[in-house]
Amino acid sequence: MANSSNVFTRELKALNQAKEILEKTGESDSVSRQDFEELCKHYESLLGDTRVITNISDRLQNKLNRANDTLSERSEEVKRFNTQLNEQNLLLQNTIDELTKTRLSRRAATITIIAAMLLFILSEGLLEPFIEAQAQKSELPPTYVSWISFGFKGLIALLLKPIEYLIDRYLQREAIRNQEQQETAQEMQETA
Amino acid sequence: MENIVLDGTGRTPYVSFDSQAGKLEISGRSIPENSITFYKPLFDWVDNYVQSPKDNTTVIFNLEYFNTSSSKCILDLLRKLETLKDTNNATEIKWYFDEGDEDMEESGNDFKSLINLDIELVMK
């Protein structure tokens, strides 16, 4: 408020002068035309200034209101964009997770195929001769030997799916653990 | 008399008062913390200048924004320049405003209606 009273120094001076004149003037005395004219002049000037300043002040306030409205609108827009971005990010993350799962499943399947090939080679190269040798010792009929051999191969084939499942689970867990370690390392870097 | 040259800041306008050229310019933004502190030296300069002005005086207002107390100071400045009308001095006052800036244009019109000097409104 000190600022606004300082810019009205001239007007305050005129008012004080008028008050001094009034104090000097007795009840029966009349104020001189010159003094009254002076007061009117100052009053007119002050009124004119007040009108202009009020207009300017109103315009400034309107400008401020418009700026505030624009700011609010932009703020809402930014919020909407942020929400959309977050949704997109979530979608992206889900897609990445699915892709990772698929990649790991394929890796598990590849490992299982390799394991199956190795088991097949082992069964043909080691297991079957062993079964035949044992069968000859115990003098079992050849059909029994075939059934035992098929039985072992069938067991190996049946075990492949559980083996693939276990490998897949192991790889998924390792991937999750690595991701958590990376996130922890990143958080520590950010706080440091 | 010494000229006044003040660089514009974020809150105060650029000021150039040249008594030799008879050119006074106030440009930029006028939103000082204490308007009278900023404008008092300019008032004193103008009070001095009108005692012995140049034959031609050009006053340029090229403001982008001003606060309410600055508007009072601009009015006071214009009132001081009104005294040049009584002399043989040719006074030219130009009030600049951007195209589309109705607020600045209307402020110029308000000043024009109050001051007994010819104020020319110029679109930039």
Image: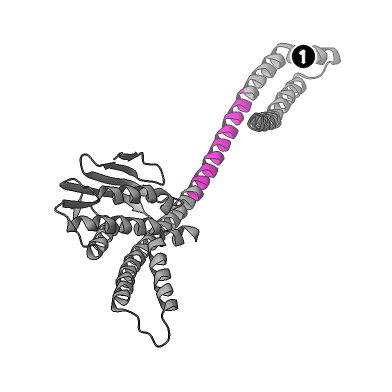
Q: Which residue is mark 1?
A: A132
Whether the magenta-drawn stretch holds residue A96 is answered as: yes
Q: Is residue B64 above or below residue A50?
A: above
Query: Which quarter shows the C terminus of chain A?
Result: top right
Give the magenta range.
A83-110
Give the class, few, some or many, for how many residues have Cα within 10 Å of label 1's Cα (few <14, many ≥20): some
Say above or below: B17 vs A104: below
Q: As drawn, is A93 to the left or to the right of A189?
A: left
- Nearest to the observer: residue A109 or residue A10: A10
Dominant SS in magenta: helix
Q: Quick one: SS at disc 1? A: helix
Tell me if B24 is positioned left or right of A108 in this view: left
Q: Could you say where residue A83 lies in the image, as x and y percent from the top left?
A: 51, 50
Inspect the image, locate mark 1, and give the three-letter code of the amino acid beneath it. Answer: Glu
Residue in the picture at 40% in, 42% down: B9
> Where residue B44 sits: x, y (%)?
34, 49
Residue at x 45%, y 62% (from the top left corner) = A5
A127 or B63, nearer to the observer: B63
Compare residues A110 and A84 and report the one nearer the observer: A84
Q: Residue at image x 43%, y 69%? A: A16
Residue A64: name its quadrant.
Answer: bottom left
The chain holding disc 1 is A
**In the rendered image, is residue A177 in sight?**
yes
Q: Quadrant of residue B25?
A: top left
Residue drawn where x is 41% and y is 47% of the image: B11
| Residue A191 drawn in magenta | no
Q: x, y percentage for residue A36?
A: 32, 77
